[in-house]
């Protein structure tokens, strides 16, 4: 028997596999086809103060070993998440869920956090300071250490649960931003959000995505993600959640060797709706194959 | 929704750039005409959504047009090949309100989903008129198939090389109908919207990430709420559509 349990900011996960925000909705689409209680947890759809439709379509583009999305934080707004989505989720998911929140000002983040704070279903806040698809918000907080620290401090001041800051790879020095978040009180760091990308249609000679640019994800970005997780693990003492192109149990182990305590699975869920379940089921045999008895022993093992 | 492995039985060209693929596999997840499947294609990351032309126990028929890389690769597949397919996606057409003389309007690659719909309506004893719009004679397919279902079939071609010269709306003028169902390109939808005399349902297309409602890649606004083309659609009722 191998041990797949890990501890994420004081909460034990049965396994380190966490579907990433924006690829798992509020869980029900997947709960229709498998029991999502097999997951470590999942990070729900990025939630903002007000309801958002998001960006114009097309929002999706094919890439080699990946995809671009430009959804633009479509969500029903925090009030509807509390009154409608969470009660529905309770029917199908009994573990603590990760609340992914986003905003356009520090006050937005604080407001959304406060509205969700009292919900006992929520185990962690994942604060998205890295959405590449909205202007004047999201990523602008995650591209400077000062702004990232300001959001972290403000959310930490009101949150009763661990606060994980989700970072953008679209920066010159991700390590300085991770450190600034840690100093501002963050309980964990998750990375990477999508890489800013673009595709152009040769027939129309125009950008495929209506918003021109979007977030590039999928297996193509995995090496970039592993490198950044490795660098951030070296620089901070708080737990790191690794993500970016993770598609197999082998990828989970590689991410953990780079320094991840838990691992998020994103685009893979969209291509194979059973991806996260398959990874969890395959994990013990892949651990055995590589002589790993306890996942906790390999976190940061490559350093 | 079910994820199933299907085996290709045949894959043949039936008109210009149009292929008909017959597959064997579990179709039990399909519950309505107008639903679609999402197919994993070798060498591509995203699945490709294709509307269901017809289905029966263990058999699936798809008609697709070669328009890009995905459908081009599909067109090279031959009998015996296995495909990983998500089956039973989307809402499909709702037949409850269609009256006794429904009109089906298919434009180009929007023709295929009309076939199973026509079959169902004929099974219910409806008097069905089908208008199929194409650009030119070389593009025309499935005229006889619809006729053998017992439908009144009108063909239009934009260049007049076959059937009625003009667009589907030119053929609509002389048809009496209680309701309409349509699938095709958006310019055709707008032309239909301008002349249609009854309620109806439109089946929309959009670039999709997942095809089952998770990614919000294919959202649209309706008069009442935001909908996902893949999960809450692809069929929308005339009254809710924001043009």
Image: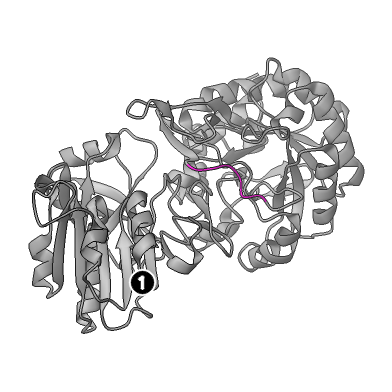
**Visual colour scheme:** one colour
Q: Nearer the viewer, residue B139 or A158?
A: B139
Q: Which residue lies furthest to the top in this view?
A: A172
Residue at (52% x, 35% y) in the render: A246
Up-down: is B93 above or below A137? Answer: below
Indicate left or right for A118 with B182 as reference. right
* Magenta residue span: A52-57
Image coordinates of residue B147 in percent, x first then y, are 10, 69
The overriding secondary structure of the stretch rendered in magenta is loop
Up-down: is B27 above or below B74? Answer: below
Q: Quick check: can you spot residue B202?
A: yes
Q: Tell whether position A55 is magenta.
A: yes
Image coordinates of residue A234 in percent, x first then y, are 72, 20
Q: Quick check: can you spot residue A3?
A: no
Q: Tell whether position A133 is magenta.
A: no
Residue at (18% x, 45% y) in the render: B81
Image coordinates of residue A65 in percent, x first then y, are 41, 30
SS under mark 1 = loop
Q: Which residue lies furthest to the right in this view?
A: A157
Q: Nearer the viewer, residue B239 or A274?
A: B239
Image quarter of residue B4: bottom left
Query: Chain ID for label 1?
Result: B
Circle 1 is placed at which residue position?
Answer: B197
Indicate left or right for A262 with B106 as reference. right
Indicate left or right for A33 with A168 as reference. left
Q: Quadrant of the C terminus of chain A?
A: top right
Neighbor class of circle 1 (other Cα within 10 Å; few <14, some 14-19, many 20+) is some
Count of residue discs: 1
Image coordinates of residue A103 in percent, x first then y, are 75, 41
Residue at (26% x, 63% y) in the render: B105
């Amino acid at each position: 028997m191998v041990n797949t349990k890990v501890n994420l900011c004081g909460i034990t996960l049965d396994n380190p596999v966490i579907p990433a925000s924006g690829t798992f909705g509020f869980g029900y689409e997947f709960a229709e086809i498998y029991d999502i209680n097999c997951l470590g947890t999942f990070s729900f759809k990025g939630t903002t103060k007000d309801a958002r439709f998001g960006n114009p379509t097309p929002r999706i583009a094919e890439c080699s070993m990946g995809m671009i999305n430009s959804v633009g934080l479509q969500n029903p707004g925090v009030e509807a998440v509390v009154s409608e989505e969470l009660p529905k989720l309770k029917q199908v998911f009994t573990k603590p869920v990760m609340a992914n929140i986003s905003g356009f000002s520090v006050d937005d983040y604080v407001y959304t956090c406060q509205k969700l704070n009292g919900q006992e279903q929520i185990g962690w806040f994942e604060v998205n300071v890295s959405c590449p698809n909205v202007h004047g918000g999201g990523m602008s907080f995650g591209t400077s250490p000062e702004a990232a620290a300001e959001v972290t401090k403000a959310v930490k001041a009101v949150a009763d649960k661990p606060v994980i800051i989700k970072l953008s790879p679209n920066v010159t020095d991700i390590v300085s931003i991770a450190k600034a978040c840690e100093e501002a009180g963050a309980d964990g760091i998750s990375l990477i959000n999508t890489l800013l990308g673009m595709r152009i249609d040769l027939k129309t000679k125009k950008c495929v995505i209506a918003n021109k640019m979007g977030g590039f994800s999928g297996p193509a970005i995995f090496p970039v993600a592993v490198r950044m997780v490795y660098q951030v693990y070296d620089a901070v003492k708080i737990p790191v959640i690794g993500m970016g192109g993770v598609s197999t149990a082998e990828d989970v182990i590689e991410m953990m060797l780079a320094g991840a305590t838990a691992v998020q699975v994103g685009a893979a869920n969209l291509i194979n709706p059973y991806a996260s379940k398959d990874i969890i089921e395959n994990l013990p045999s892949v651990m055995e194959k590589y002589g790993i008895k306890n996942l906790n022993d390999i976190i940061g093992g490559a350093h | 929704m079910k994820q199933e492995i299907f085996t290709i039985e045949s894959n043949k060209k039936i008109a210009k750039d149009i292929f008909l693929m017959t597959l064997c596999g579990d179709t039990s997840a399909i519950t309505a005409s107008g639903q679609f499947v999402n197919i994993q294609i070798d060498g591509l990351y995203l699945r490709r959504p294709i509307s269901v032309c017809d289905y029966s126990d263990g058999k699936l028929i798809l008609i697709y047009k070669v328009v890009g890389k995905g459908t081009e690769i599909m067109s090279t597949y031959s009998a015996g090949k296995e495909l990983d397919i998500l089956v039973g996606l989307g809402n499909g057409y709702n037949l409850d309100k269609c009256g006794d003389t429904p009109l089906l309007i298919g434009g180009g690659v929007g023709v295929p989903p009309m076939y199973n719909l026509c079959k169902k309506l004929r099974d219910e004893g409806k008097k069905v008129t089908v208008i199929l719009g194409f650009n030119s004679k070389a593009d025309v397919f499935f005229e006889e198939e619809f006729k053998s279902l017992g439908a009144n079939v009108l063909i239009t071609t934009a260049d007049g090389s076959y059937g009625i010269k003009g667009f589907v709306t030119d053929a609509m003028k002389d048809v009496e109908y209680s309701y309409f169902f349509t699938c095709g390109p958006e310019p055709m939808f707008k032309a239909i919207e301008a002349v249609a005399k009854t309620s109806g349902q439109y089946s929309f297309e959009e670039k999709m990430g997942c095809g089952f409602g998770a990614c919000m890649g294919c959202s649209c606004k309706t008069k009442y709420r935001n909908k996902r083309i893949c999960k809450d659609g692809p069929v929308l009722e005339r009254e809710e559509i924001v043009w």
